[in-house]
Amino acid sequence: MRYSIFSLARQALSGHRGWRPAWRDAAPRDAYDVVIVGGGGHGLATAHYLARNHGITNVAVIEKGWIGGGNAGRNTTIIRSNYGLPGNIPFYEWSMKLWEGLEQDLNYNAMVSQRGVLNLYHSDAQRDAYVRRGNAMRLHGVDAELLDREGVRRIAPFLNFDNARFPIQGGLLQPRGGTARHDAVVWGYARAASARGVDIVQNAEVTGFLRGPGGRIAGVETSRGTIRANKVAVAVAGNSSRVAAMAGFRLPIESHVLQAFVSEALKPLIPGVITFGAGHFYVSQSDKGGLVFGGDIDGYNSYAQRGNLPVVEDVCEGGMAIMPMIGRARLLRSWGGIMDMSMDGSPIIDHAPVPGLYLNAGWCYGGFKATPASGWCFAHLIARDEPHPVATDFRLDRFAAGRMVDEKGQGAQPNLH
Amino acid sequence: MRVKCPYCGDRDVHEFVYRGDAAPVRPAADAGEAAFADYVYLRDNPAGPIAEHWYHAQGCRNWLVVERDTRSHAIAAVRLAREAAR
């Protein structure tokens, strides 16, 4: 069923009894051309673009739990392309362009809301760094605007401009940045892929790989049986190392826990996404009214999907430093998600070191905004066995070869990226 | 999470700095590029028990080897790194 104002009106007149499930909850078949491991945003987007761009529809997406139940449901929904390195900017800008046409492409309301992403600066040196990043963005055709103090005041008059330690001097604004509804992105991709014939198989956890001649990957063993496949693509960020271990190789990745928070619902208050430049704190307001915010990862290896109190304190202190009024809001919920923290802070979209296996991993805590381009480029790699032009730097061998894409310049210390 | 420092006793995780997996061992100087790339970048990243280096920065400033489960954050044992190295 195509969604439109007419389908809505028709359903309204018939008491909304005619709505059907948006996608097919399939049972696994014996064999597919491509099996995608991981039913999050990236895996489902990959399935959609495999079908849409490359005509490959004999595809299964297998998910250990329910689709969107991992990091796709645990992020803070921010979309932006305000990066500074040549390896990153074209990729994230392609993602932003796909976000801008996503709802028409999927015929699904993903609530993409381009209300702007504002990074505050608090010193002359930080202003210079932001000028440099803004110029790099504009040279790549990305929108960026440097605001002075008064420019920031026009957007967010409620900020604490005269904090004794970190007075706000201005900000770098990406007006096209904003937020999207994370669950709707998952459901929209699932619906579009399912409509083109992709099987979405839930509650099927991968327990091992089938090997063919020469050690080539020939399929997967799952908790719902064996599935053969010509190509197996892994998009399981958070658990990439575990799946790689089953295939017999190690990755330049550590799994870390990132916490996020939401307040009780408030009247419209925060105009877009605002980030604190002197600590690590970012906040936006959901359409339901909750303030959605977060900060640093906890900093130690974890698969536990929950964090500790020092980071809760640190994030709240960051919020209080730039936005003292936030202290009046009550915290509704906090949660944790497991990040693939890579050794240079950038992702990997490449052939795995085992033939027949494709790898999409290492998204650190920036995977949500990348969902459309990640799927687009991963589908390109799987279909054509060559990297997409905007993702050529996300190679697995860049670490050994010394071609890091290190946006923060922290070196091989994953908990600092 | 609390870490039982062998020198200071049971202390909040806030006082410690995390370094990472204690398993990688620096290769010999002539071991070659592949061995060093492996040492610097590749990790086992286990879901389960792991031995890690923690530094008690806001305490006794000892380096520790902490045995911890990454699925539950439960800590099984803590030793001084210089004793673990013996």
Image (tube, rainbow, N blue to C red):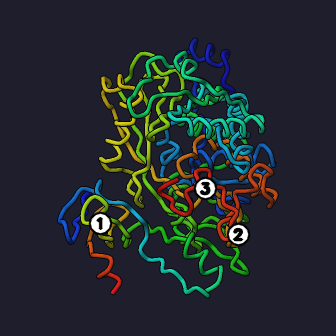
Question: What is the distance, in whole Å, between disc 1 and disc 2 at their CAs?
Answer: 36 Å
Question: What is the distance, in whole Å, between disc 1 and disc 3 at their CAs?
Answer: 40 Å
The disc label shown at residue B61, or none: 1
Instruction: List x then y, in percent, for residue A146.
Output: 64, 28
Discs 1/2, front: 1
Instruction: Say what amino acid the circle numbered 2 marks.
Output: Ala
Instruction: List x then y, in percent, for residue B76.
Output: 26, 70
Residue at the spot 31% in from the left edge and 41% down from the top edge: A313
User: Which residue is label 3 attached to?
Assistant: A235
Q: Nearer the N terminus, badge 2 or badge 3?
A: 3
Instruction: Say what amino acid the circle numbered 1 marks.
Output: Arg
Q: Secondary structure at mark 1?
A: loop
Residues at circles 1 and 2 in contact by the CB criterion of under 8 Å? no
> B73 and B65: which one is in front?
B65
> A40 and A255: which one is in front?
A255
Subunit bearing disc 3: A
User: Which residue is label 2 attached to?
Assistant: A401
Q: Secondary structure at mark 2?
A: helix
